[in-house]
Image (spheres, rainbow, N blue to C red):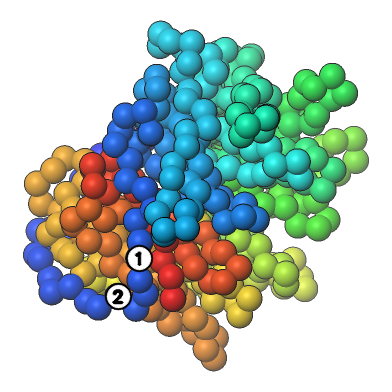
């Protein structure tokens, strides 16, 4: 699935943009520091997920590959007084050996903490049924960590879901929510809830199985890659990478009802008015929900220049939602394929990344090698008079830098940005970066 997506990205943009040429680098508006370059060995490799920060300023994340057994890792980065960062692998997946990886393998989603400082996440593969898992890492004495498997997917012909690419989120009573990319009755993916029991066991409730509406296009959406967010009323919001009225993705809401039933409402189908290049194609990431109930996200493709979009959905009094779209221009130096999630500061400015593009066209060859599509960018959107303005905060470089960010960024309390690139670094297996003002 990951390889297939990577191949699609490379082929699609080779056809769309043709050959790209090396441009003169632009001066970055902020300073970037590589906190850790992965080797692809015991320290991990290919960090697909965003990072999570604790109150002490330590950085946590996952790598898709590497680790002691080759099945990926959970890592922690700790700052030292001399300005360097030290990596510690908290857990290496596939510890039982062989190909089954019963403890999980190939994590892609962002981690979350509970109030006790334990970490929660998912792996898209491995587990008892090879359909992926939801796990907890419990902090012990001397900063040791122990894995608990909370749920093994594919327990019933994968009707319960399979392949969770995104992480999980808590509600106010301690239940976990997430999505799986495929599985379910019609294999279009599911939204699930995990409820903790008194004995430490967790029970899965299927909130929704995609492709329940429409036999051709799955008008209710299918193949959710991003996770979910919850509002104060307990409604669940997310995106799908495909399906919807025009089969190019959708934004959905799940509303709880009596007796544990949930109702899905499609808030927006991309490709509106049959114009697929207008409001976006393929929403890969989780949404951001602000205090006013507005939703923000990205699409990897589409928009006026087919370079991807950042979108805002605002609820109306009549139940309808209004979309406001920022289209990344058809200009390679401003970045394209913004398939990570969106972060916001206290002023409402938005921050995210673009997988390709930037100042270094012809560099950073991804997946196949050869001609590159650019190393990617970090950018900010500010709103004025109802319009969004883009500013490039950092252009990733082709030498020893993080490259090709597939996830968004995480803000700390002072406005510094943290993220990952799945390529690059000193060893070519990706890196974790910090961008300061």
Taking the spot 30% from the left edge, 75% from the top edge, the residue there is: 28
Residue nearest the observer in this picture, 235 or 78: 78
Task: Decide: is 259 above or below 276.
Answer: above
Residue nearest the observer in this picture, 234 or 167: 167
- Residue 75: x and y in percent read 49, 38
Residue 400 visible (yes or no): yes
- Residue that carries the numbered disc 1 in the rendered image: 32
Query: Which residue in the rendered view is the most extreme toward the front?
Result: 81
Mark nearer the viewer, 2 or 1: 1
Quadrant where the image shows the N terminus: top left
Q: Secondary structure at mark 2?
A: loop
- Residue 119: x and y in percent read 64, 38
Residue nearest the observer in this picture, 87 or 376: 87
Q: Secondary structure at mark 1?
A: strand
Q: Are marks 2 and 1 in contact (CB under 8 Å)?
A: yes
Count of numbered marks = 2
Task: Decide: is 192 above or below 32.
Answer: above
| C-alpha span from label 2 to label 1 | 9 Å
Taking the spot 79% from the left edge, 31% from the top edge, the residue there is: 195
The local crowd at label 2, few if under 14, some if 14 to 19, many if 20 or more residues have their Cα within 10 Å, is some
- Residue that carries the numbered disc 2 in the rendered image: 28
- Residue 138: x and y in percent read 67, 30
Could you tell whether 244 is left or right of 178 in the image? left
Taking the spot 34% from the left edge, 56% from the top edge, the residue there is: 34
Residue 339 visible (yes or no): no
The local crowd at label 1, few if under 14, some if 14 to 19, many if 20 or more residues have their Cα within 10 Å, is many
Taking the spot 62% from the left edge, 20% from the top edge, the residue there is: 152
Could you tell whether 288 is left or right of 63 in the image? right
Task: Decide: is 62 above or below 253.
Answer: above
- Residue 332: x and y in percent read 23, 68
């Amino acid at each position: 699935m990951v390889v297939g997506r990577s191949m699609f990205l490379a082929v699609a943009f080779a056809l769309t943009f043709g050959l790209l040429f090396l441009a003169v680098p632009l001066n970055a508006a902020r300073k970037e520091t590589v906190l850790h370059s992965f080797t692809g060995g015991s320290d991990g490799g290919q960090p697909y997920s965003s990072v999570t920060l604790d109150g002490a300023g330590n950085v946590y994340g996952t790598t898709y590959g590497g680790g002691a057994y080759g099945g990926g890792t959970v890592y922690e980065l700790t700052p030292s007084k001399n300005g360097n960062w030290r990596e510690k692998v908290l857990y290496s997946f596939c510890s039982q050996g062989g190909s089954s990886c019963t403890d999980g393998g190939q994590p892609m989603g962002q981690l979350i903490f509970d109030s006790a400082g334990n970490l929660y996440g998912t792996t898209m593969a491995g587990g008892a049924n090879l359909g992926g898992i939801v796990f907890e890492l419990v902090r012990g004495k001397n900063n040791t960590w122990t894995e608990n498997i909370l749920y093994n997917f594919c327990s019933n012909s994968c009707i319960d879901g399979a392949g969770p690419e995104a992480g999980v989120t808590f509600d106010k009573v301690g239940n976990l929510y997430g999505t799986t990319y495929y599985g379910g009755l019609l294999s279009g993916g599911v939204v699930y809830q995990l409820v903790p029991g008194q004995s430490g066991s967790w029970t899965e409730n299927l909130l929704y199985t995609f492709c329940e509406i429409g036999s051709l296009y799955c008008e209710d959406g299918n193949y959710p890659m991003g996770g979910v967010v919850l509002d104060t009323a307990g409604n669940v919001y997310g995106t799908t990478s495909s399906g919807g009225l025009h089969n190019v993705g959708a934004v959905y809401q799940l509303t709880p009802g009596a007796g544990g039933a949930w109702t899905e409402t499609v808030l927006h189908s991309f490709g509106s008015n049959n114009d697929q290049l207008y409001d976006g194609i393929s929403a890969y990431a989780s949404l951001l929900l602000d205090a006013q109930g507005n939703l923000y996200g990205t699409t990897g493709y589409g928009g006026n220049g087919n370079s991807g979009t950042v979108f805002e959905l605002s609820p109306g009094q009549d139940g309808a939602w209004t979309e406001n779209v920022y289209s990344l221009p058809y200009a390679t130096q401003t970045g394209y394929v913004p398939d990570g999630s969106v972060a916001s500061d206290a002023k409402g400015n938005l921050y995210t990344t673009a997988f390709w593009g930037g100042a270094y066209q012809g560099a950073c060859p991804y997946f196949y090698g050869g001609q590159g599509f650019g190393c990617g960018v970090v950018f900010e959107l500010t709103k004025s008079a109802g319009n969004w303005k883009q500013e490039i905060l950092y252009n990733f470089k082709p030498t020893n830098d993080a490259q090709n960010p597939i996830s968004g960024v995480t803000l700390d309390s002072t406005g510094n940005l943290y993220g990952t690139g799945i390529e690059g670094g000193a060893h070519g297996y990706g890196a974790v970066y910090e961008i300061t003002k």
